[in-house]
Image (cartoon, grey):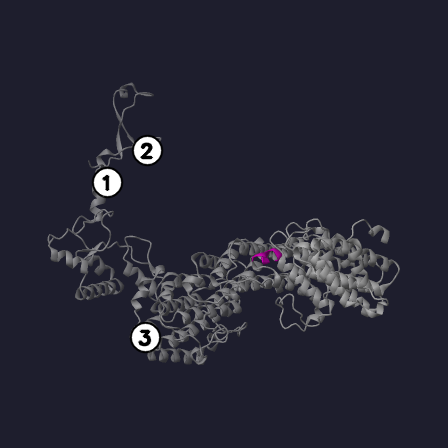
Amino acid sequence: MSSNLCCCSPCRPTFRKHVDNIYPSVPEEGLVQTKMDTLVYYAARSPEKLDRIGEYLEQRISRDIYRNRRGYVFIGMEAMDQLIKSCHINTINLFAESFLKTVQKLLESPDPELQILASQSFKKFSEIKEDAPSYHRSYNFFIERFAQMCHSDYPDAVLRRELRLSGLQGLNGVIRKTVNEDLAENIWDPKHMEKIVPSLLYNIDPAQLEGRGDRETPDLGTSIGDAKSPCWVADEILRELVQSASFGSIKAILRPVLQFMQDHDLWDESGHPRATHTFEAIMYSIHMDLSYKVIDKLMSELDLPTNSLVQKASIAIVLSQIIGIGVGDSTVGPAVLEIINDLLKQLKKSAEKEKTYDQSSSNPKQLLQHALLDALGQYASKMPDFQMIEIMTFILSKVPHDSRADHEQQLILMKALFCVAEKHTPTLFSTTFSPQLLTTLMRLLQAPDQDVRLLVLQTFQILVDRHSNREKLAKPTLEPRNMALEGYPNKFNRSDQIFVQKSLFNVFQHFKRVLEEQSNTIEFIEAIYTTCALLHIETSATDESALYLLDLIESVQGIAIKNMNLSTENRFALHAIAICFLSLLATTVQSTELDVYLDGIVQSRDAKAPHMLPPLSEEYHPGLDPNTPEEDILIDSIQVREALKNAGKDVQRMDSLPRRKSPSRNSWPEQREQYLNSNSSSRRPSTISSESVNGVDYHSSCSSPGIIRKPFGEDVSIAAFKKVLEGPSQVEKEAEVARKKEMQQVYLNATLEEIMIKTAKDGPELRDLLNDVFSRVSFSELIPLTTDARDPEEVHEPRKKSIMACRDPYNRLFPELFMY
């Protein structure tokens, strides 16, 4: 060896002498530190000699390894460690090659202590930052050997622990040396990640990590817990590796992670703690902008046909536990709807395949659906409120409508909507109930399936309940004032008033329509009560809410009385919720008169018809007759109106509700409204067209024949224009209201003859007009016979023939009827 090192250069013996002097005569004495300091000083003064010093040290250590002189091997590696630390950054490449060759020879040794020594030295080398990229180096061998050490099964437990820990530290050193160097070997290459990632996961045991205070990423580079534990070190390295990943390299980590789960059957593990911890560590460490890539990768695992239903359920459970990590108010954009869409697709697939699974797989299928729904709710709960509204609208757009074949899809998607709604915090109704959302919910309320309709109501309740009154109003009650309802009385809110004026009546109309369904259960009727009660409580500050609730009371009672197709139980239930609505109205209006009237009805029903009071029941005595309720136990809307009027409510608004407007353009609105509002609503309205009364025209005369418009006034002064702008005075308004009331009374109470006299107009009667028309029409005319004449005397003589004898009499013209 000395012959190889000797040459004509006079400096060769000098560095050899310095290197030889650091070795003691007996290895137990350790490194001669004074001579080591001399060697370091010499290397610093002559950095160009570092490569030769390294080569000589490498040869001496290799010889000692071969001769099994372990003491001198440790001394040589200690010298190399000190030299590489003292090297200047610009000259480290001169020494690094010899150092890495020495570490490689140590790793090739079967001696576990030398392998541990190599890992410790490589760790110190990895902590040195280099300015120049070392793109000529290759770490393939180190990655492979360190990965093997991570999987060590050495018989001695202490050495096995040390070997695994050393392997992890070595992998961490390789990652740190290569992850941030663009020109270095690509550590994200699949052939490297397929060795590094499984080695880390193999050493992670969640049972040993229970001491961590939280699940968030620790401060990397610090010692947490047991620093000598391979489990803790592997967890830290995995988090550091994920934190260093970029958009293009995160897939390189996720692919071997999922493969490791499959190879070691971690999806089938009871409670799957290792899978859950692994993905939690990834989600807590990854950049927030890349978290959706992890979710997307797990979603793709659900589509693999090789996964069983049990495995898919396990994947979905893990997904539900990690999907909300890293999601915040800033998580908006197309990636959100993409994840929601993927979850909905998986839910629809689980519903479509329901009949393909046998009975033994029903439980995993339910677990899969529950986990997907939970994942959807957890993901939506991290979103801002406006994003939740968009998500709910997006889900509703996926729900099939009016299709009995899609019953399962309707049901599962409505459950998804309910899960998102549960995470939403109700605020302003105008913000929560967008037109599209409200319209679709009301359309689904008409679905043929009872479960779908019930989910629509429960979703509506969650979106309405701003003061947590849902549980208190879950059952119909006659004592709502004793239930400590929150948020009542409400302060006036302009936004709520707009919602009430635009949408509340329409919502109640849909509720009325669905109450006429014969398939309604008692649970569904109770849900209708809860929904309407919450709506009224939340909007009680507006006058329209009380009027709409009274209209709902009238309609519910009318359905219970007139709809003979409903079951006896449902008709009694409708009577019961009608009186409960009245009790709720009395609570919010604060009217003594209404309270007295309510108490009277309750007492009468309690004595004569207790079955028309809450609580609702599934079965009643078969002898009860719902068809002939007595008048004193029914709600009289006229008395309720009078009580509301005395309480300061403008009950005249009920006469202008949208459903009370007649489609006929020539009928009196007031008359039509009174007919619909009266108890004799089954009476047919009068067909007499009243065009003007007392010389006043109430209809559009521009397109109505026979109606003469009033002439314009001749006064065109400034005062006249000001009067037009100011509108009618208070006296004129009161006179107009009085005149309308007088007209209403006339049409309600007067006889037909009196009404005809009142509406009589100068001009010919209808009978005279008909006679005049018929007199001007000739139903027969002279038709000359030009051909086919049997009598020669009649050839030139015309003969009368009926017009109806013609083949097309409807084409005959009557010019005498036209006026030019």
**CA separation in Å, label 1 and label 3:** 58 Å
Residue type at mark 3: give it.
Answer: Ala
Observer-nearest of 818 and 466 = 466
89 left or right of 617? right
Q: Is residue 130 left or right of residue 466?
A: right
Judge the density around disc 1: few (<14), some (14-19), many (≥20) Cα neighbours within 10 Å. few
In percent of width and height, residue 643 lies at 32, 75
Looking at the image, can residue 170 be seen?
A: no
CB contact under 8 Å: marks 2 and 1: no
Q: Amino acid at mark 1?
A: Phe
Residue 316, quarter of picture: bottom right
Q: Is residue 110 left or right of 230 when viewed as pictured?
A: right
- Tell whether position 2 is magenta: no
Kind of residue indicated by mark 2? Pro
Q: Which residue is mark 1?
A: 774
Mark nearer the N terminus (2 vs 1): 1
Q: Tell me which segment is drawn in magenta.
A: 289-294
Q: Image quadrant of residue 581?
A: bottom left
User: SS for tag 3?
Assistant: helix
Question: Which one is closest to the eye, mark 2 or mark 3?
Answer: 3
Looking at marks 2 and 3 on the same chain, the residue that comes earlier in the sequence is marked by 3
**Mark 2 crowdedness (10 Å alpha carbons): few <14, some 14-19, many ≥20:** few
Vertical placement of residue 609 versus 666, above or below: below
Instruction: Assign a secondary structure to mark 2.
Output: helix
Query: Residue 483, how many percent across, how many down?
Result: 46, 79
**Secondary structure mainly formed by the magenta segment:** helix
Residue 20: % across, % down: 81, 61
Query: Can the viewer see residue 468 in this picture?
Result: yes
Which residue, given by chain and number where applicable, does mark 3 sit on? 643
In this view, the mark in front (1 or 3): 3
* Image: 258 above or below 159: above
